[in-house]
Amino acid sequence: MVSQTHSNVIKKIALLLKDHGIHWVLIGSLNLALQGVDVDAHDIDLLTDERGAIAIGDILKNYEVEKVHFKETEYFKSYYGKFLIDGIQIEVMGDLLSFHSTDNEWSKTKEPVQKNILDIDGIKIPVLSLHDEYEAYIKMGRKEKAEKIKEKLLVDKLESN
């Protein structure tokens, strides 16, 4: 489910980033929900490169909770920043390295194979394809969400035939 607040905040972000030449893409639960996967959207996750993360940090400075910096956890390494707009948490990740539980190793998140564009009230939102999201969730060992994505991909395939 996508709340009106989530929809408004992602549109606001897209407009703020629009003319800055930043390559970014929406990932995670909001991306899945906007593309029709049966999940609740909680926060907003943006994937970019190091330069993009720093630039987004500057653009969203008034909403900053955690300044963009290189951060390591047991699950990821990234140029990472956290922001809060209208009560919605935004996480920005640049040059993301993810730990993949399926093969027990770190790997750099590749540029999106298929970057799709969603149009929300005339505002273009770059989103990661469901296929790429599915692969990422499988590698992270998050099977429940991966199955929901797979179901949506199968429904879409059946509907297009």
Image (cartoon, rainbow, N blue to C red):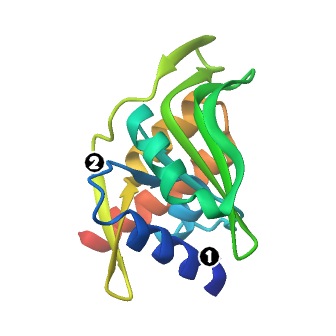
The answer, for residue 53, to whether it is visible in the render is yes
Task: Give the amino acid at mark 2.
Answer: Gln
Q: Quadrant of the N terminus?
A: bottom right
Give the quadrant of residue 138.
Answer: top right
Q: Residue at x 39, y 36 (%)?
A: 51
Q: Earlier in the sequence, mark 2 or mark 1?
A: 1
Q: Quadrant of the C terminus?
A: bottom left
Q: Tag 1: Cα neighbours inside 10 Å, few (<14), some, or many (≥20)?
A: many
Reading the image, the residue beneath label 1 is 6
Where is residue 145? Give x, y as percent: 64, 50
Please report contact status of discs 2 and 1: CB closer than 8 Å, yes or no. Answer: no
User: Would you say 156 lies left or right of 99 here?
Assistant: left
29 w.r.t. 145: above or below: below
Where is residue 106? Give x, y as percent: 56, 14
The disc placed on residue 114 is 2
Pick the front one: 48 or 146:
48
Where is residue 12? Give x, y as percent: 49, 76
45 w.r.t. 85: above or below: above
107 w.r.t. 18: above or below: above
